[in-house]
Amino acid sequence: METSGLDLEQAALAQRDNLTTLQSHILAGERQHPGATGTFSWILSALSLSAKVISAKIRRARLMDVLGSVDNVNVQGERQQKLDVIANETLLRCLGKRTGVAIVASEENEEPLILRTSPGPDQRYCVLFDPLDGSSNLDTCGGVGTIFSILQHDPSVAPERSVLQPGARQVAAGYILYGSSTVFVFTAGAGVSMFVLDPSIGAFLKVADDVRIPASGKTYSLNEGNRPTFPAGYQRYLEYAQQNGYSSRYAGAMVADVHRILLQGGVFLYPPTKKAPDGKLRLMYEANPMAMIVEQAGGKAIAGKERILDLAPQTLHQRTSVVMGSPDEVAHVLRFL
Ligand code: AHM
Ligand code: MG
């Protein structure tokens, strides 16, 4: 007998007897910490709300005529897309209402934004983010994402120092992929959970707990157009990969590329290039949060020979090279560096 689409949908729904929303997952996490004030959960709920708003805006962007760029360039010297601006403002608005956030820092703003100066017991966190990663994909309906990193605020140092902590000190990190579905991937340091937005009910529903990255996978993801200017070790690695049956997959948005690697295995690389000798990706709100996710899922994340999460940041918008993914694949790359 032929199986209809309806049969498949009903069978899938019947299996989902335990519908856990992101919200209930966050509250369950809070209950595991006696004495928790709810401040941290409240911040995560702001991120979840931002993700829903940004997702809705991206899905309607062509209809609302908010594709394309605005006239200004951001602090990175890159032309801002209209949706970069909209996503940044959405996050600032949602997080700005949460008293637990002392400082926010965004790829789109030159300086960290100090939300609250008067010291209060509640103002315990810094939230760093890239509001819309890979935004040049927007005009062609490609995948884009939001990346965030949460650090404990240190009120004893100047605010601009408080955000400059190594990635190993992140309290939580995550990303939202706006792809063929909207996916929220998150860790608070005890494994990685994954949620998918069900637009019919406006909630993120849990689809996986304790996501584990495959130990290996014959896929590499990098901008091969830059190959002639990669340091020799990376070029040798590519020769090895190509002689050993690897596939190449590159969406041009770190969130989309790392998400594939997280689920299917392989390695994502953004090596130093002639144009970007220190690497292109930003340490504080791209490399660190993605590295925490990958490590929490059992993977590895390095810059040159160093662990990304151990790098000591000097500036907010500092760049780094990146190699992250399946532990065996990162080890292969490392052999050539
Ligand atoms: P963005 O944050 O300004 O969008 O830039 C970061 C993006 C990453 O998502 C992606 O991995 C990389 O830039 C792509 O760069 P390239 O076009 O050089 O391959
Ligand atoms: Mg980015």
Image: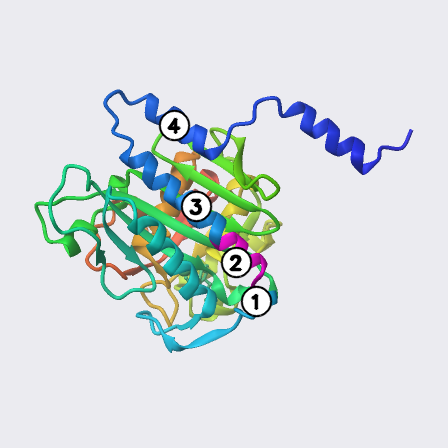
Give the residue at mark 3.
49
What is the crowding at mark 4: few (fewer than 14 residues within 10 Å), some, or many (at least 20)?
some
Q: Residue at x 16, y 56 (%)?
A: 160
Q: Quadrant of residue 327?
A: top left
Separation of marks 4 and 3 at Cα, in angstroms? 15 Å
Residue 6 percent across, percent down from the top left: 79, 35
Q: Please name the residue that numbered disc 4 is placed on.
A: 27
| SS state under label 3 | helix
| Mark 3 sits near ligand 2, with its Cβ under 8 Å away | no
| Front residue of 326 and 293 | 293
Q: CA distance from mark 2 to mark 4?
A: 27 Å
Q: Tag 1, which secondary structure?
A: helix
Dot 2 corresponds to which residue? 57
Q: Quadrant of the N terminus?
A: top right
Give the CA separation, mark 1 to mark 4. Answer: 35 Å
Of the two numbered discs 1 and 4 on the same chain, state the one appearing first in sequence.
Answer: 4
Q: Secondary structure at mark 2?
A: helix
Q: Amino acid at mark 1?
A: Met
Residues rendered magenta in the picture: 54-61
Q: Residue at x 61, y 66 (%)?
A: 63
